[in-house]
Structures are given as structure tokens and as C-alpha cells.
Amino acid sequence: MSKVVGDAHQHCLTPPENAAIILAVLDVEAKEKKLARQGILLQVVATLFGASIAYSIKGTPQFAIAVLSGGAISIVNATLLAWRMSRAALHPAQEAHHQLRLMYFYAAERYLVVVLLLCICFAVLKLSPLALLGGFVMGQALMLAGRLFLRRIG
């Protein structure tokens, strides 16, 4: 349906068309939330598996704890990303500049949380740097690859 305003055509959606668009948006948001939960679960399982392999290879719990800590930092990062994405979807910004500022803020927030947690694990807990970074990199790689894989099968 279109209305003529002056020389320009203005398109208006009927109530059933509006409802269809809203349902489609809600469906996409629900699928994204499910995908995020599945990706985080995949990271948790892989981190536990990686820590058990590290323990079986080295035989010391400190090495396994370092791998677990690195994976946990990656899981915190993914959880923070999923949480911020869901919050942004609930409160869409009116201006593109505001949305862009929020995206930069959320990225900086995640970066600082990861750096802070890594520093605590290195300096305070004195965990093995190689095992800690190995667990973190494994978790980050799974966050990216798992999301692509889960999207394909879902």
C-alpha cells in the first residue's frame, strides 16, 4: 500500500505486514541468543576437555588450572559479548552515532576485562603463561569457529 504525498510515494505497511516484521525480528533475536548460549557451552566443554588433557600430559594440577583459567577468561569475554548484544537489542539507539559509541565502549570494556583477568592470573596467581595463553587462545578460537559452525548446522 502506498500513499502519494506531493510527487513522492510513501510506503506504509498494513498491520499484518507490521506484525510479520516484528515476528521475524523477534525470531532472529531468539536464534542469536540460542546461538550465543550454545557457543558458550561449547567453550565450557572444550575448556574442561583441554584442562583434562593438560593434566594428563603434565600430571600437575597447576598446569591444568592455568589452562582452565585461560579458557574461563575467554568464556567471560564471550558471555560479556552476548550480554551486551542482548542489551543493545533491547534498547535500540535512535542515532547511529550513539550506537557506534556504545559499540566502541563495549569493545573497550571487554578488552579491559580480559587484560585485567590475564594480569591477575600472571602476576597474582603466578600461573604458567604458556598454559594460560593456550587455554585463552583455544577458547577464543572456539568462540569464532564455533559460532560459524553452529550457524551452519542451525
Image (tube, rainbow, N blue to C red):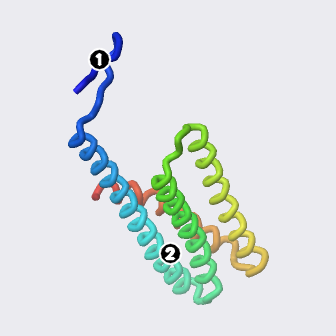
Residue sitting at x 28%, y 51%: 23
Q: SS class of the residue under badge 1?
A: strand
Q: Choose between 140 and 53: the one closer to the eye.
A: 140
Q: Count of labels shown?
A: 2
Residue 43 at x, y percent in the picture: 47, 70
Q: Which residue is mark 2?
A: 47
Q: SS class of the residue under badge 2?
A: helix
Q: Sequence order check: which comes first, mark 1 or mark 2?
A: 1
70 above or below 101?
Answer: below
Is residue 93 visible in the rendered structure shown here?
A: yes
Residue sitting at x 31%, y 48%: 22
- 112 left or right of 150? right
Residue 128 at x, y percent in the picture: 69, 77
Q: Which residue is mark 1?
A: 4
Q: Three-letter amino acid code at disc 1? A: Val
Q: Quadrant of residue 130?
A: bottom right
Residue 42 at x, y percent in the picture: 42, 70
- 111 left or right of 78? right
